[in-house]
Amino acid sequence: MYSIRTRKTANGAESYQITVKIVGYNGKAVQKSTSWKPNYKMSEKQLQLALNRVAVEFEKKIEAEFAGRQAPIATENTFFNDFAQYWLSQIEKRHSEAYYASANNAVNKIAPLMKDYRLKDLTPTVLDDIHKRIDDMIKTEYVVTAKSTLAEAVKKAARYKTVFCRNNNVSVQTLKAALQMRHICYASACLIAQGVNMDVEEVFNVQVRQVPYKSAYTEGMKQAIRNTLAEAAKLGIVKRNYARKLYITTKHPDSVKVSSMSIADAQKLMQTCNRLDIRKKLIITFLLFTGARKGEVCGLDWDDIDLENKTVFIQRQYEAVSKKGLILKAPKTKSSIRKVELPDALIETIKEYRLWYENKRIEVGDKWQGENNVLVAQNGKRLHPTTVRNWLDEALLLAGLPHCSVHSLRHTNISILIAAGVSPVAVASRVGHSKTSTTMDIYADFLGSSDREASGKLNDYFAMDSAQRKTNNE
């Protein structure tokens, strides 16, 4: 029930105190009050109608917060970080482990920025400021390469590299990269240094630098805020989600444009693959010919490949998830589950690799750990996605080509398809984009060059037709 009491303000005007008394969800009486005064002069009848409307709305609000059988999940006075934990619990139930790990990491990163804000505090102005602070965040980055003394130190510590790695919890690939003077992470360098009983600086060159986060990473933090407030708005805890792009004016820094190899460089890389181990040749050829993601190729089983019909069914991916390790999971989106036609050149490479695979399985015998994995390590275990990057670096070095990421092979595949005149709809379907607009937006530059090529061909055609008409008239 509510009650209304008239009060006089300091300047003599009238205001009204509305008090609501109910039995709360814990069985105890709850009494809450609010003040209201009209914004303009009203008749007696108008005043009574307005007072009753305000009182009823206030009563409903108090009942919603306190009169349920269970305590409310949150109120507008709940601190953002507390409600973000509730949102994460829902994400864990509804989404994949990889998405939850990514969201959890983002929430932990923004927690220091958000610790003093309640849900009701997050207005567009406040969120603009938070977004700018996220864009200005920097991280400490270590550039670590081995000194020439490392190889001898490892040899003294253990007779075999595999034994050294097993004893010191370091992967063979990481130790190999270190010994080849390639960059490794600081944590791995510490483990290796501990294994040889030396300080990190004795066996590694360590450079420390402060760098900004990549725009994709900062956008993930902003998205965590946006999605958390979306959950609060859905539950009626806040009236609006002011983190939506409709209300926010700040923009995250432009991300780096997609990088793609030229057709000439892609052909040179393909020719170099013939000089590589068949496993390395297969993975690079597969990525270039299908445009598949690295994790999708590493997640393939032999049952997914139909050599007779020349297709591959992509339905899972193999990737590292924070605090979970390597897991098999569903692809990035529903559209990423797809069947892709394989060209004859790739079919021949797969057949060549299958022959190696069967011979290797016989050679390893009982120590073979794989079952149906296509891409495997020497012992049959599913291939670690990081190994793909190392193999590509090796191939690029052998071909005399500049460094590029594994994902750039996907961009190369898509740009070649677009340049060849394949429609964006067909390209999107083949590479697993959920929307054609994704292909259009990301590869706008390639689409533009294809359009210019089409314009040139039209110009040549009609110019030729005009010249031919002139010749005929003469």
Image (cartoon, rainbow, N blue to C red):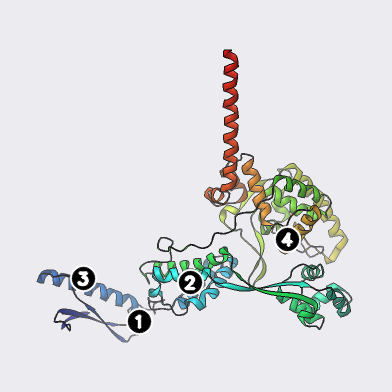
- Amino acid type assigned to the residue bearing label 4 in the image: Arg
**Spatial CA span between label 1 and label 3:** 25 Å
Rendered position, 209 above or below 194: above
Residue position marked by numbered label 1 in the rendering: 25
Whether residue 291 is visible to the viewer of this picture, yes or no, is: no
Labels 4 and 1: the sequence-earlier one: 1
**Spatial CA span between label 4 and label 2:** 35 Å
Residue position marked by numbered label 3 in the rendering: 53
Q: Evaluate if marks 1 and 2 touch, with contact meaning CB atoms under 8 Å apart.
A: no
Q: Nearer the viewer, mark 4 or mark 2?
A: 4
**SS type, badge 1:** loop
Rendered position, 365 above or below 260: below
**Spatial CA span between label 3 and label 4:** 66 Å
Crowd band around label 3 with a 10 angstrom C-alpha radius: few (<14), some (14–19), many (20+): few
- Amino acid type assigned to the residue bearing label 1 in the image: Tyr
Rendered position, 345 above or below 379: above
Labels 4 and 2: the sequence-earlier one: 2
Labels 3 and 2: the sequence-earlier one: 3
Give x and y (percent) for residue 314. 65, 53
Give x and y (percent) for residue 24. 32, 82
Q: Evaluate if marks 3 and 4 touch, with contact meaning CB atoms under 8 Å apart.
A: no
**Spatial CA span between label 4 and label 1:** 57 Å
Q: Which mark is residue 169?
A: none
- Amino acid type assigned to the residue bearing label 3 in the image: Arg
Labels 3 and 4: the sequence-earlier one: 3
Residue position marked by numbered label 4 in the rendering: 389
